[in-house]
Image: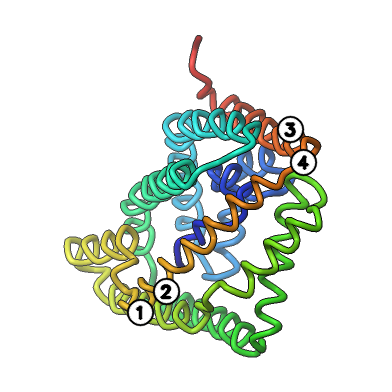
Amino acid sequence: MHIKRWLVALVTVLVAVLVLSACSSRQLGYRYAEQLVSWQVGRIVSLTSEQRQQLRSETDALLQWHAETQLPEYMLVLNRAYRDANSKEISTEDLEYYEEQLYVFWLAVRKALVEPSVRLLKTLSDEQVAELIDHIQERRNERAEENLDLSDSERVAKRKDRMLDQIRDNMGRPTRQQQEIVALWAQELPDTSELWIEYNQAWFAAFVDALALRHDHDAFSQRIESLWIEPEQFRSETMQEVLMEHRAVSMEMMIKVHGAMTDRQRQRLMRTIDGYRRDVIGMMRQRDAVPQS
């Protein structure tokens, strides 16, 4: 469990404030999120009928809070993103604004997850805790192996292709100049694979220790709050320094990609962002959370 990579292509920074999947079924997923969450968790831990009902109830309450308090804020940022998409220049200050908003949105969700997480995790039996730990460890091992099996050149190529796909999905085919900008970025970006593995291992070890305290409400609540709200505490000093370099290189790339946008790409990006705005309104309507004008 780690915080999303903040700085990706400009178009993703503009759009990712939704903190939602990029598929065309966003509204459908929001409508049936309780069932989807229950199904996904059920694949990780064998829940009792009472636990499954509690999970759905907690998810429903969280989504209502999200629709009423968070989605209106997403709309404000998307409105600014729409205007910025039509600009021929974007500054470091503009990108820092989006970075800050992403952090604010993600922190709000993490804070909202603390209490329901405590309530749900406290109900797990020793067997369920062991099942949860085994599943997370297995998935972590798989991801670590996938990352470490790649050569440096393969990792650079994967990074470049992923970024070009994001540009293509949101604003159309990248120009030759944009492809060169992204290729250079992929080469210059410091590799963080092993640092993320170390960070995730430290966080996971602390989570396992916290689960052992789940029958001590005060101690367990404090541990979960710390893990959910301040996961950065497990980052090494080296990782912090590398991430700052990562951020600087990525911001420079975004500014260059934006400056190289064609009029056609700009119009495509504006349509993409407008689609996200319509999605947000649709999701708010599903929960009767659209503000009265």
Please state which of residues 227 and 31 is positioned toward the viewer in this rendering.
227
Q: Disc number at residue 262?
A: 4
Q: Residues within 10 Å of mark 3 (few under 14, many from 20)?
A: some
User: What residue is at 42 percent from the left and 74 percent from the top?
Assistant: 242
Q: What amino acid does circle 2 point to? A: Val
User: What residue is at 34 percent from the left and 66 percent from the top?
Assistant: 231
The x, y position of residue 204, in whole percent, is 39, 77
Tell me: 158 left or right of 100.
right
Q: At numbered mark 2, what does the secondary structure look like: helix, strand or loop?
A: helix
Tell me: 236 left or right of 88.
left
Reading the chain from its start, which is encountered first: label 3 or label 4? 4
**What residue did someone put label 1 on?**
238
The x, y position of residue 20, in whole percent, is 59, 47
Q: What amino acid does circle 3 point to? A: Arg
- Distance, label 2 to label 4, CA atoms, is 33 Å
Whether residue 173 appears in this view of the structure is: yes
Q: What amino acid does circle 1 point to? A: Thr
Q: What amino acid does circle 4 point to? A: Thr
- Distance, label 3 to label 4, CA atoms, is 14 Å
- Distance, label 2 to label 3, CA atoms, is 35 Å
Contact, CB < 8 Å: mark 3 with mark 1? no
Q: Disc number at residue 242?
A: 2
Tell me: 30 left or right of 153.
left
Contact, CB < 8 Å: mark 4 with mark 1? no
Q: At numbered mark 3, what does the secondary structure look like: helix, strand or loop?
A: helix
**What residue did someone put label 3 on?**
271
